[in-house]
Amino acid sequence: MNEYGSLCTEWYEALYKYPPQEELELYSGYLLDDTQRVLEPMCGAGRFLIPMSAQGHAMYGFDHSAPMLEICKAKLAQRGLRAQVMQASLSSFSYPMPFDMIFITSGSFGLIVDPHEALVSLKRIHAYLSDSGVFLVEIETPLENQDALKVMHTMELTHNVQESLFLRKSESYDVQSNIYTADLLFQKRIQGHLERSEAMKFVIKHYVSDEFEHLLKQAGFCAVKIVRREHMELESTLSTKSLIYECRK
Ligand SMILES: C[S@@+](CC[C@H](N)C(=O)[O-])C[C@H]1O[C@@H](n2cnc3c(N)ncnc32)[C@H](O)[C@@H]1O
């Protein structure tokens, strides 16, 4: 579940290579100087970690996907950047020191769908945050346009004339638990012939604001506030799509 394999990584890189500028500015805006240590759990291919490292910040990151980390390490080496990244899981990562800022972007925290694992993970983040440190985390809110979900659809992303990448996806949404599930099948074709395929179950938990605040408080965070709401237009009204929380001890 939620294992980002090599074809999924290719797909992600093709669609989400660069971070939204506004979000990048929000996260780096919390950093006063380059001596502060910053941890990005679930850093993936380094969409945020790499530009922040290029800005001079002392960046550390981890992710449990080997293909995502491989891309991240290659980009760091290519640009001569010194950020430290390693393979680890959110519920069991470990470092010899605390961090001044920890941040999780793009609703990735919702990939931890098991409530016990979510709490254990937040407690771990709390334990690795310095006393004056800040934890920033984005969560997605319950989907309101479930009608837009597709039973089955296929998308094509052509790299060049020779090679193409396809994604077949079947989506569903559980309105009780607010969990979105997609059965994904990535396929790489070379000159029209199937070269490789990769299946993935993508599952993400959407949180209502009170529910997530409760979880943060349970994990030990005392001061919790929403610093950004992203909206989307839904039948000419604005609906909240995601929230970024600022959490302190
Ligand atoms: C949506 S991607 C986001 C990556 C990056 N933060 C970005 O904005 O491009 C989510 C990442 O979370 C990682 N991931 C999912 N569950 C994880 C876990 N339990 N521990 C560590 N990483 C995890 C995946 O491997 C993937 O790279």
Image (spheres, rainbow, N blue to C red):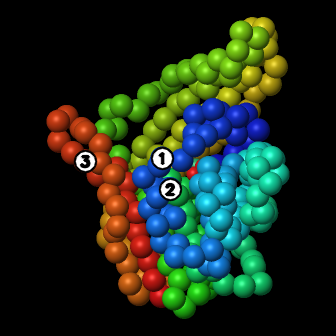
Numbered label attached to residue 249: none
Q: Which residue is mark 3?
A: 239
Residues at marks 2 and 3 touching, judged by CB atoms closer than 8 Å: no
In the visual, does 65 lie left or right of 108?
right
Does mark 2's beta carbon lie closer than 8 Å to ligand 1?
no
As displayed, is residue 210 above or below residue 10?
A: below
> Residues under labels 2 and 3: Cα distance?
23 Å
Q: Which residue is mark 1?
A: 20
Disc on the earlier residue, 1 or 3: 1
Q: Secondary structure at mark 2?
A: helix
> Residues under labels 1 and 2: Cα distance?
6 Å
Q: Residue at x 74, y 42 (%)?
A: 5
Q: Secondary structure at mark 1?
A: loop
Estimate how packed mark 1 is, as few (under 14), some (14 to 19) or many (20 or more) residues with alpha carbons within 10 Å. few
Q: Residue at x 57, y 43 (%)?
A: 18
Q: Amino acid at mark 3?
A: Ser
Residues at marks 1 and 2 touching, judged by CB atoms closer than 8 Å: yes
Q: Amino acid at mark 1?
A: Pro
Q: Residue at x 57, y 76 (%)?
A: 33
Estimate how packed mark 2 is, as few (under 14), some (14 to 19) or many (20 or more) residues with alpha carbons within 10 Å. some
User: Does any portion of residue 49 appear in the rendered image?
Assistant: no
Q: Which residue is mark 2?
A: 24
In the visual, does 145 lie left or right of 38?
left
Q: Nearer the viewer, mark 1 or mark 3?
A: 1
Q: Position of residue 230 (x, y in %)?
A: 33, 52
Q: Position of residue 219 (x, y in %)?
A: 50, 82
